[in-house]
Image (tube, rainbow, N blue to C red):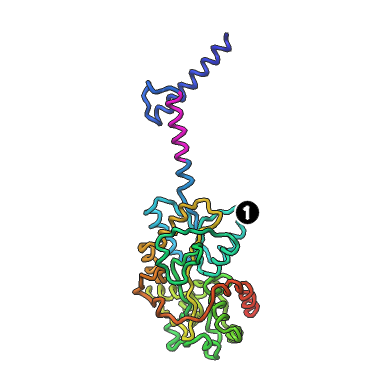
């Protein structure tokens, strides 16, 4: 009998505790304190909160520029309510991070400064298609792959950036910088760290299959320095420690010039490489719908304006820059992305051997 009353008392205390807690959270009246009426809404609310938490973010690994990535993050979050967890790095480091995390993937989206690098991710089965991407039909020709895995939401060209206080007549072509007058005065980004410079090396070699390596051997002989990624390679030119940086991304030249720094840029008359900056949704993305929402946003006119404000070429062909050269004004080398992707590792290895 004592056991019965003990159990009954325990049940009453439990029901009273649940009723009080649920009464405050769910605003029920005393008449509604039945077990079925109180517990069910609380469970449903908890489920909804967990669901919202799971779907409330997108994890993005992005290769510069940081100002643009942050601007896109701010506008995207304000427009969608989705939290964007942004990891900023270089293309090379992002690829290494994705490889290291294969067993426990973290990122949903990767934004790369190298089209062949994005193609490499796709070839390894690390990306997924987004067939309904909004405005993807407005992208520049060749800035979307045929399976809708890779979207070139923006782009940059590789040029010759020079210090205007040290240089009055920059060389007109790449090979000019193998001449004695430029000895020890020139930087080039490290293609193992800079996806855009990596594309330049592969693009130049594709255009000059018989003697393309002669350029890089000549640059080495003329004491051209391999100086980190794009920003690191450009800084000595801004300060005057170096006169020129070859194959640097053009938007850095335009943006620094706009800030009043003594720099300007020319595009070699023989042509250069324009890098579509690729955005991909990763195969193991945990937040696929939010990743798709981000791709859609990056192709909106609003986001494309952010791109142009950063002195970067828009991915869409219906928009034009007013603060820099447009795509149709830049002379191009002849190159093939598929071949460049296949030769990428081989080309980087040989480049580094030349400059070691």
Residues rendered magenta in the picture: 35-49
Residue 202 appears left or right of 30: right
Q: Give the residue pinned by disc 1.
A: 103
Q: Residue 268 placed where, x, y %?
A: 47, 84
Q: Residue 171 placed where, x, y %?
A: 48, 88
Query: Who's the residue at 45% across and 21% down the image?
Result: 16
Q: Residue 107 placed where, x, y %?
A: 53, 56
The crowd level at tag 1 (other Cα within 10 Å; few <14, some 14-19, many 20+) is: few
The answer to whether any part of residue 219 appears in the image is: no
Closer to us: 299 or 17: 299
Closer to us: 4 or 301: 301
The answer to whether any part of residue 48 appears in the image is: yes
**SS type, badge 1:** loop
Query: Who's the residue at 46% across and 28% down the image?
Result: 39
Q: Is residue 197 above or below residue 91?
A: below
* Magenta stretch, overall SS: helix
Closer to us: 102 or 134: 134
Look at the image and say whether residue 36 sits in the magenta stretch: yes
């Amino acid at each position: 009998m004592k056991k019965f009353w003990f159990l009954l008392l325990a049940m009453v205390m439990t029901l009273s505790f649940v009723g009080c807690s649920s009464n405050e959270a769910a605003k029920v009246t005393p008449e509604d304190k039945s077990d079925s009426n109180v517990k069910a809404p609380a469970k449903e609310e908890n489920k909804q909160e967990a669901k919202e938490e799971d779907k409330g973010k997108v994890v993005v690994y992005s290769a510069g520029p940081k100002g643009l990535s942050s601007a896109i993050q701010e506008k995207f979050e304000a427009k969608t309510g989705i939290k964007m967890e942004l990891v900023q790095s270089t293309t090379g480091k992002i690829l290494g991070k994705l490889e290291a995390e294969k067993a426990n993937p973290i990122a949903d989206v990767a934004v790369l400064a190298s089209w062949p690098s994005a193609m490499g991710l796709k070839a390894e089965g690390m990306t997924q298609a987004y067939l309904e991407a909004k405005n993807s039909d407005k992208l520049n020709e060749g800035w979307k792959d045929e399976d809708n895995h890779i979207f070139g939401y923006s782009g940059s060209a590789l040029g010759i950036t020079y210090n205007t206080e040290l240089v009055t007549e920059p060389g007109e072509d790449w090979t000019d910088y193998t001449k004695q007058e430029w000895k020890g005065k020139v930087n080039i980004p490290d293609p193992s760290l800079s996806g855009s410079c990596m594309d330049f090396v592969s693009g130049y070699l594709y255009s000059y299959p018989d003697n393309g390596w002669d350029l890089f051997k000549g640059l080495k002989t003329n004491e051209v320095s391999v100086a980190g990624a794009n920003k690191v390679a450009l800084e000595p030119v801004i300060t005057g420690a170096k006169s020129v940086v070859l194959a640097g991304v053009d938007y850095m030249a335009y943006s620094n010039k706009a800030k009043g720094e003594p720099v300007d840029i020319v595009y070699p008359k023989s042509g250069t490489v324009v890098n579509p900056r690729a955005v991909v949704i990763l195969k193991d993305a945990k937040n696929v719908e939010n990743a798709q929402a981000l791709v859609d946003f990056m192709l909106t006119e609003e986001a494309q304006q952010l791109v142009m404000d950063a002195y970067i070429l828009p991915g869409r062909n219906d928009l034009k820059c007013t603060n820099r050269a447009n795509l149709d004004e830049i002379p191009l080398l002849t190159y093939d992305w598929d071949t460049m992707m296949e030769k990428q590792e081989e080309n980087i290895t040989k480049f580094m051997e030349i400059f070691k």
